[in-house]
Image (spheres, grey):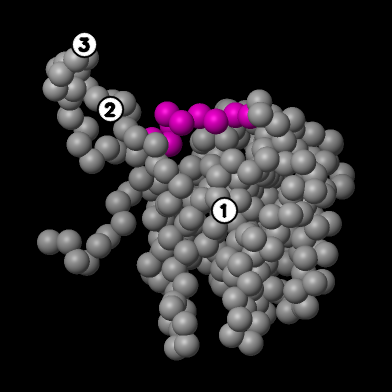
């Protein structure tokens, strides 16, 4: 990251290790973890364009049954640099560990920060279908006209996007993989075509693929060579036209719906 030019990135989006002892991360004390994150965040701020965005997707650190919500733990590290929180997005999903002594976790969060009040936000590319798309005003000067935007509605700040498990079309050997659709929505909303997207914890390249799919430039780094190799293979497959990804607005299957 230090080799990249100051203020050159329009979107920095990532899912850092949660310090929970998965095979690709060494478990450390929460204090050391925060110190390591502080260093990465400081470098991300250096790289962020004045009208750019940082999106930090995190879950919980659990120690001896006690939950430490990492979005709250890390919030102050961003505020130290004068960043402004625009949304605390809740990512909800249907699958995960089944807990015995607390409710099973089925959501994580994305902290979206900007450097200034002059930031990119493109709503139209990420609108979702309205529940009643043909609803019209029934009185007043707009009577008979559509009451909502014909392109759909704001997706709000709770996103139901399946996480990548064994039967997911995007599944690789990574134990905690970013779904491409999650990053696509951020790329479309927070950047313009041709702009730069960086993932400082690239993993198997989901952020890069989301950027490339929509005509952005992709940058990333990772410390695990196995995942770098997988990311390179996935990007090659994308350019070859045979990479499978879950469509962004594909409805989530609900077995309770008839």
**Distance Cα–Cα, label 3 vs label 1:** 40 Å
Q: Nearer the viewer, residue 169 or 156?
A: 156
The magenta-colored residue range is 119-127
Residue extending farthest front = 140
Confirm or deny contact between disc 1 and disc 2 (CB under 8 A).
no
Q: Looking at the image, can residue 1 be seen?
A: no
Say the numbered circle drawn on residue 255: none
Relative image position of residue 236 (x, y in whole percent)? 58, 49
* Neighbour tally class for label 1: few under 14, some 14-19, many 20 plus, Cα within 10 Å: many
> Is tag 1's residue or tag 2's residue first in the polypeptide sequence?
1
Say the numbered circle drawn on residue 110: 1
**Distance Cα–Cα, label 2 vs label 3:** 15 Å
Residue located 77% across and 41% down the image: 82
Residue located 82% across and 71% down the image: 32
Say the numbered circle drawn on residue 148: 2
Relative image position of residue 228 (x, y in whole percent)? 69, 60
**Distance Cα–Cα, label 1 vs label 2:** 27 Å
Relative image position of residue 10 (x, y in whole percent)? 68, 35
Residue located 84% across and 36% down the image: 5
Q: Residue under circle 3? A: 141
């Amino acid at each position: 990251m230090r080799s990249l030019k100051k203020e050159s990135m329009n979107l920095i989006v990532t899912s850092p290790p949660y310090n929970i002892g998965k095979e690709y991360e060494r478990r450390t004390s929460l204090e050391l973890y925060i110190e390591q994150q502080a260093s990465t965040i400081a470098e991300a701020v250096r790289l962020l364009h004045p009208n750019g965005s940082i999106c930090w997707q995190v879950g919980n650190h659990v120690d001896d049954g006690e939950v430490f919500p990492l979005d709250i733990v890390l919030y102050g590290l961003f505020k130290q640099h004068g960043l402004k929180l625009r949304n605390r997005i809740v990512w909800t999903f249907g699958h995960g560990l089944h807990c015995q002594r607390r409710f099973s976790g089925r959501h994580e969060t994305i902290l979206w920060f900007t450097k200034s009040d002059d930031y990119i936000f493109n709503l139209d590319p990420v609108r979702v279908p309205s529940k009643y798309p043909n609803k019209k005003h029934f009185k007043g000067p707009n009577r008979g006209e559509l009451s909502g935007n014909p392109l759909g509605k704001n997706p709000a700040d709770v996103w139901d996007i399946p996480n990548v498990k064994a039967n997911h079309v995007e599944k690789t050997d990574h134990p905690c993989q970013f779904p491409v659709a999650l990053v696509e929505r951020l790329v479309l909303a927070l950047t313009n075509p041709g702009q730069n997207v960086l993932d400082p914890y690239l993993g198997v390249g989901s952020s890069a693929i989301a950027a490339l799919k929509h005509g952005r430039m992709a940058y990333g780094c990772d410390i695990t060579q196995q995942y770098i190799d997988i990311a390179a293979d996935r990007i090659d497959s994308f350019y070859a036209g045979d990479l499978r990804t879950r469509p962004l607005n594909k409805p989530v299957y609900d077995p309770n719906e008839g």
